[in-house]
Amino acid sequence: MSSLELIALFFMALALFARLLRLLIGPTVPDRVVAADILATITTVALVWIAHKFANPIYLDIALVYGVLAFVSVVVIARVIEG
């Protein structure tokens, strides 16, 4: 693993921790929804990185499906919050 990959993993873990904290103690519901959306994006990026690291394209399909489902779920939650 190269040093650039280690740095990227460190910043992904830092972003994951920060968004998880915002999800747990967010002052408003929209803050928590945005945090959940960002967590889904970070998870999608992690799946793409795993696909690259293991040279297995099935993880790209999983990342694509996960990203679409995460987007749809955030849109549904936003509509419910809106009224």
Image: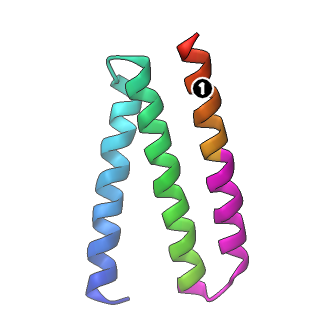
Say which residue appears at 47% left-offset and 30% top-offset: 33
Image quadrant where residue 56 sits: bottom right
What residue appears at the point 58 percent right and 35 percent down from the top-left corner? 74
Which percent across, then down, holds residue 34? 43, 35
Judge whether 4 appears above or below 70 on screen. Answer: below
**Badge 1: residue crowd in 10 Å (few <14, some 14–19, many ≥20):** few
Which residue: 35% across, 61% down? 12
Q: What range of the chain is rendered magenta? A: 53-69
Q: Which residue is mark 1?
A: 77
Q: Is residue 17 left or right of residue 72?
A: left
Say if 10 sits above or below 35 in the image.
below
Q: Is residue 59 above or below residue 67?
A: below
Q: Is residue 62 magenta?
A: yes
- Where is residue 22? Give x, y as percent: 34, 32
Q: Quadrant of residue 64?
A: bottom right
In front of the other: 83 or 47? 83
Pinpoint residue 32: horizontal percent, then vertical percent.
43, 28
